[in-house]
Image: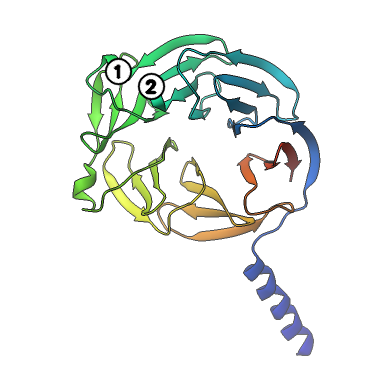
Amino acid sequence: MIKKILALFCLLICFSCGYSQDYKLVGEVILPEGHFTTDPIGNIYWYNRGDVTKYSPLGVELNRFSTRDFGEISHIDATNPLKILVVFQEFSKALILDASLGRNSIIDFTSSNMPFVKLICISRENGFWIFDPVDKRIKRVSDQLDVVGEGTPLRQITEDPLEPNQLIDSGNWLIMNVPDYGILVFDRFGTYFKTIRPPSTTLVQANGDDILFKEDTQMTQIAVKSTILKHFIIPENMPEDECRVEGSRIFLRKNNDLKIYSY
């Protein structure tokens, strides 16, 4: 009986501490000041000002891109490794780069009827999803910036003034993070589904039915439909360190040191 009680006690400790894995350091990259993101196959994209560098899942440099035409890069959407979206919020513009970081096209919202667009992501069904800050709703636009679909207006969701900082197409859902409000979830047609609280104070990842983000020193995973929340332990880190997960890889940045772990 005592052995059973001890076993149950240890099991409860494991669940309260989160899920853990055995991690192996497989690569390391020294990055200058800036930000990074990843694509679904584990390639790494460092960016700062108008510069982008692509690394392999093991940290080997592959390609570079640089421009000074549109100000500073605000974020990169690499959910499609063959169609890298590089966004310049200050000028409401974006670039499409190919897998070798070659420039394919320029997206200019200032020449359309939506000159104040800041949030844009790749649509899994062709074109892009944007947040129109004038109409306060998400819209799907074609590659030629024609509106082909509109989502639920935010005023029908809440009267609170919302300032979203991120928009992601997970393949199943559209995820909009509002740091001081919550994570808004829309279906693939842009119809509002639910709000998940509390919001993430860091940038989120989303794939399929799952939302993932770093919370303090652990990763938090939320299932959209059930809202079941799980925590799992990642290699030793500080709350301010950045982390992303792709497949069986964990990418953990401490200052200028990006470490790549397999599990």
Q: Does residue 124 sit above or below 166 in this rendering? A: above
Query: For the residue marked with disc 1, what is the amino acid?
Result: Thr
Q: Label 2, label 1: how many angstroms apart (C-alpha)? A: 8 Å
Of mark 2 and mark 1, the one earlier in the sequence is 2
Answer whether labels 2 and 1 touch (C-beta < 8 Å). Answer: yes
Question: What element does badge 2 sit on?
Answer: helix
> Residue under circle 1?
110
Q: Say whether residue 80 is visible.
A: yes
| Residue 99 position in % (x across, y down) | 58, 16
Which residue is rendered at x = 72% and y = 85% of the image? 5
In the image, residue 105 above or below residue 206:
above
143 to the left or right of 253: left
Mark 1 falls on what kind of element? Answer: helix
Above-or-below relation of 177 to 63: below
Q: Which residue is at a point 51% across and 60% down the rendered structure image?
A: 229
| Scheme of image coloration | rainbow
* Rendered image: mark on residue 26: none
Residue 187 in picture, x, y percent from top left:
32, 42
Which amino acid, mark 2?
Phe
> Percent from the top left, x then y, of residue 63?
66, 15
- Please identify the quadrant where the N terminus is shown: bottom right
- 251 or 87, which is in the foreground? 87
| Residue 91's disc number | 2
Res 197 → quadrant: bottom left
User: Which residue occupies 31% across, 19% down?
Assistant: 109
